[in-house]
């Protein structure tokens, strides 16, 4: 059972597993508990290694009202510090950049620090009490862990290791070669909803029939599988290559009622940005020409995908053609979710926007494999304070358009809790249970 807040502000269990108290999304008290017991103790994806490629590069990772400085202190080492000067607390750096002088200098009274966080100079140290130790005047270190090209941070010195936290993910995701991926795009929007509302919308397929009815023409949304992966979650097919494309049984169509090639073209059209340009064109060619002998449209499409990946000059290791056709949707607890394909992934990371339970920062990362000889530079990070100012494609527009309504509706005095579908919204329930492991320990 997930926990709810009693009138006295104590955490008490609910009585039914699928009923999620709305306070978990709308109350300042619950939000504050997360700020105190979840975020300071959980491993968080702060950035990718490629965002701090050179010694002295830094990036400010913000979570709620906390700012953390991630910096490459030597070619092999990435460190993280609380972004605060041990003199009078001044924030040491903002945004992204490079400590070009090879040191971190506080703008206020010019205390200086090595890139490894040790203190280099306390100006006029002779005026300070002799009892002031070097340890007191260095930067506060935060634990860093690295996996798959991602840089994780954890503010809790006593936390479990990153390896233990990730559990089954590294072994399961190894074929996708995250370490070979680089950013294709990095966009950030502000969503007028709790960070969990913004995440949940991508952690279940139950809403497809309600929010994206156009997708039912080529998606069988009823057979999606959901389940836990340690603290994390999985959704998607059962790990088998699809040989046919079929519409949702909700539409009541029979095989003779539709042309698979048409469905493929519709899919490519609708998922637009998720596909490469060449891939789109090849599927259109497929649609307009007779199918190869003995192949279904899905098989022919699978051949195109394999050919494209094999033709890119990228080392695909020992991946079989079958593995090249797989995909997985993974929720990396607590706040990253998205579909993963061999060669590319689109991940969504949501975070509280400051200390407001009703606002979230959402990053959209598209990553893709690059050839070993390609010197891919970090892409431009684009920021959209108003998500509606840009056309994100129909599906994403539909998801975003829901969010303010979800958040506002939960705040209604008439909202008595969220009644989740135990199977199709399993991942959301499980996320709440794992949040409670942090809040209650
Ligand atoms: S606040 Fe940083 S040197 Fe004074
Ligand atoms: Fe959606």
Image (tube, helix red, strand yellow):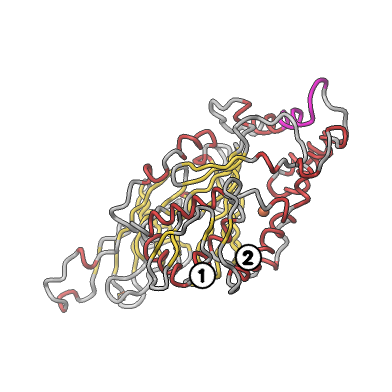
Q: Residues within 10 Å of mark 1 (few under 14, many from 20)?
A: many
Please identify the quadrant where the N terminus is shown. bottom left
Q: In this figure, which residue is indicated by the disc labeled 2? A: 406
Question: Would you identify the image quadrant in which residue 406 lies?
Answer: bottom right
Compared with 248, 52 (above or below) is: below
Q: In this rendering, would 349 be left or right of 40? A: right
Residue drawn where x is 57% and y is 41% of the image: 374
Give the crowd class for mark 2: few <14, some 14-19, many >=20 residues within 10 Å. Answer: some
In this picture, residue 64 sits left or right of residue 134: right
Residue drawn at x 76%, y 51% is 213
| Residue at the disc numbered 1 | 357
Q: Please provide the residue range marked out in magenta.
A: 293-304
Regarding mark 2 in the picture, which secondary structure is present there?
helix
What secondary structure is marked by label 1?
A: strand
Residue toward you, 302 or 186: 302
Q: Position of residue 360 (x, y in %)?
A: 55, 66
Name the magenta segment's main secondary structure: helix
């Amino acid at each position: 059972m997930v926990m709810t807040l009693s009138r006295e502000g104590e955490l008490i269990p609910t009585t039914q597993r699928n009923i999620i108290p709305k306070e978990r999304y709308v109350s300042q008290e619950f939000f504050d508990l997360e700020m105190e017991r979840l975020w300071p103790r959980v491993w968080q994806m702060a950035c990718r290694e490629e965002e701090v490629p050179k010694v002295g590069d830094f990036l400010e990772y913000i979570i709620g009202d906390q700012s953390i400085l991630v910096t490459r202190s030597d070619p092999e080492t990435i460190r993280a510090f609380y972004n605060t000067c041990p003199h009078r607390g001044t924030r040491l750096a903002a945004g992204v950049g490079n400590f070009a002088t090879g040191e971190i200098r506080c703008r206020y009274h010019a205390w200086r620090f090595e890139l490894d966080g040790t203190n280099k100079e306390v100006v006029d140290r002779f005026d300070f009490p002799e009892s002031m130790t070097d340890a007191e005047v260095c930067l506060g270190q935060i634990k860093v862990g690295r996996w798959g090209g991602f840089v994780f941070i954890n503010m809790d010195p006593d936390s479990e290791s990153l390896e233990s936290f990730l559990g089954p993910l590294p072994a399961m995701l190894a074929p996708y070669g995250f370490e070979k991926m680089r950013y294709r795009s990095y966009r950030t929007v502000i969503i007028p909803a709790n960070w969990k509302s913004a995440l949940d919308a991508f952690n279940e397929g139950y809403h497809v029939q309600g929010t994206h009815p156009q997708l039912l023409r080529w998606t069988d949304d009823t057979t999606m599988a959901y389940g836990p992966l340690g603290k994390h979650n999985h959704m998607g097919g059962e790990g088998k290559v699809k040989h046919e494309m079929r519409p949702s049984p909700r539409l009541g169509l029979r095989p003779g009622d539709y042309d698979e090639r048409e469905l493929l073209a519709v899919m490519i059209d609708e998922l637009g940005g998720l596909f490469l340009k060449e891939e789109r064109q090849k599927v259109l060619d497929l649609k307009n020409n007779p199918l190869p002998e003995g192949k279904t449209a899905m098989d022919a499409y699978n051949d195109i995908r394999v050919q494209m990946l094999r033709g890119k000059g990228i080392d695909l290791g020992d991946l079989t053609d079958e593995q090249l056709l797989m995909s997985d949707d993974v929720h990396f607890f607590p706040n990253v979710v998205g579909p993963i394909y061999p060669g590319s992934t689109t991940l969504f990371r949501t975070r509280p926007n400051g200390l407001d339970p009703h606002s979230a920062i959402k990053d959209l990362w598209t990553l893709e494999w690059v050839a070993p000889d390609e010197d891919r530079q970090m892409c431009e990070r684009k920021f959209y304070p108003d998500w509606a100012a840009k056309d994100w494609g129909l599906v994403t527009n539909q998801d975003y358009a829901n969010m303010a309504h979800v958040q506002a509706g939960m705040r209604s005095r008439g909202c008595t809790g969220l009644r989740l579908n135990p199977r199709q919204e399993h991942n959301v329930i499980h996320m709440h249970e794992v949040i409670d492991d942090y809040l209650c320990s």
